[in-house]
Image (cartoon, grey):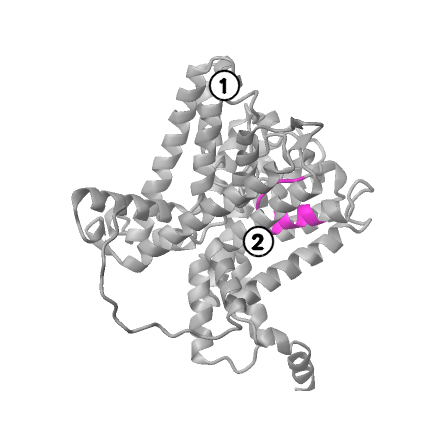
Amino acid sequence: MILSKVVNRKYAWYRRLSVPQFTVATGLLVVLLGTIVLAMPICSSENVGLWESFFTATSAITVTGLTIIDVGIDLTIFGQIILALMLLIGGLGLMAITTFLQGFVVSGIKLRSRLDRGKTLDEFGVGGVGRTFLGIALTAFILIGIGALFLFYFGFTDTSNFWTRLWAAIFHSISAYNNAGFGLWSDSMESYRSNWVVNLVILLLIFLGGLGWRVTSDIWTNRKHFKFQKLSLHTRLVVRTSVFLILLGTFGLLLTESINQNHLLSSMDLKERFFTSFFQSISARTAGFTMIPISVETISDSGLLLLMTLMFIGASPGGTGGGIKTTTVAALMAATRSTLRGQDDVVIRHRQISDKVILKAVGITVGSLIFVLMMALMITMTNSFDGKELFSFLEVLFTCISAFATVGFDIGVTQQLSHFGQFILVVGMFVGRLGILLLLSAIWQALNKGRIHNQNRIGYPREDLYV
């Protein structure tokens, strides 16, 4: 009782925060703690200062994978373990962990607060707390464990040291399932381009991690009498959209790089070219692992544009990836189809979609586009040295989308940026992981000093606009 009173007094200001504000504050606190720990000599070499630790910790918590250090060299084994733990925290749901923390700080939670927490959790994509979160964690650890076993026994067989191979298998399994893209080798997965076991395990973990808890839970629940049409609309939409985007990325890269003969993929045989395109198509959906070096020299402009599209869309709600999400794009496409048909309602698979969902999809897309363009604008303003531009606009925009969508693809820009440019990427990673609407909600509530605005029930006359 005494301890509880002390905590309540000390954190009285925390009790006045809304859920979005509490989430942002907790996220910043986790990043700060990660920065301090990674900067310690026990975790890193002399090459890693506070700035490098700050950038790496943010990239890990947001499961992005962009880095300005060499993880396998600059971090000790203890530092790599800390990094893996941060990947788990970020991947399994920063919002769920935030909600648990809030339960210890905030006492006497009323019904409105509980509904607010549940609503925000749903927006973040976690799906709930309690048993649901335990289910998410259990599923993650089982899949990560299976992936690590396959990588250990059949994948990283070129590593003779038992403990080195075991840790490499565990670390890359964690990184892949959480769609993080962090690797212990400087060239990511390029050394294992011809190793089918490594690539298939990594791809499966990326795909399963990006599907989301709702989808995996729905499929598992219906496993005995499995029929695709019996699954929920959300599950069917996520699976169909994900498969479509994978095929679009695979054949799209094959086409763009076949037309542009001076790039890396064009020098491969058809089998290797197809699998590389397939791997990069899946990895572009917020994972960040690479089988080939990605740059303006190795990939054509049209290929980079295709990858940017896949990165911006990202994974699915409740998954470990980022982006605006597959269901957002599906809802917008359905709304476009309804408009072309002259329909008043948006219908997907004989199910009417509410206007609230469509408005949210529009808000997410427009807000994300504006934010990414603002990131690119601020970086390009400092993108010059002695009157010469350091990077093309395509390179800057690619890196901004990679950071915001928490992908981690780097085309040689991140390390060469100034601290200001890298800070813009840090902000982009943080906002991209929490969600643009959650951040705007936190800012809006701060500006209105926490006042609750009830839904306006006054009806207004309608008037049309020409669009």
* Residue nearest the viewer, comparing 109 with 187: 109
The secondary element bearing badge 2 is classed as helix
User: Residue farthest to the bottom?
Assistant: 1
Q: Vertical placement of 69 versus 320: above or below? A: above
Q: Tell me if mark 2 has few (under 14), some (14-19) or many (20+) residues whose alpha carbon lies within 10 angstroms of its own.
A: many
Q: Which three-letter amino acid code belongs to the residue tagged 1?
A: Leu
Decide if residue 222 is on the left or right side of residue 162.
left
Magenta range: 54-67
Picture coordinates of residue 401, whole percent (x, y): 52, 40
Q: Tell me if mark 1 has few (under 14), some (14-19) or many (20+) residues whose alpha carbon lies within 10 angstroms of its own.
A: many
Image quadrant in which you'd find residue 293: top right
Picture coordinates of residue 224, whole percent (x, y): 31, 52
Q: Vertical placement of 112 versus 276: above or below? A: below
* Residue nearest the viewer, comparing 373 with 243: 373
The secondary element bearing badge 1 is classed as helix
Determine contact: label 2, label 1, CB under 8 Å. Answer: no
On residue 90, which mark appears?
A: 2
Q: What residue is shown with label 1?
A: 265
Picture coordinates of residue 123, whole percent (x, y): 43, 59
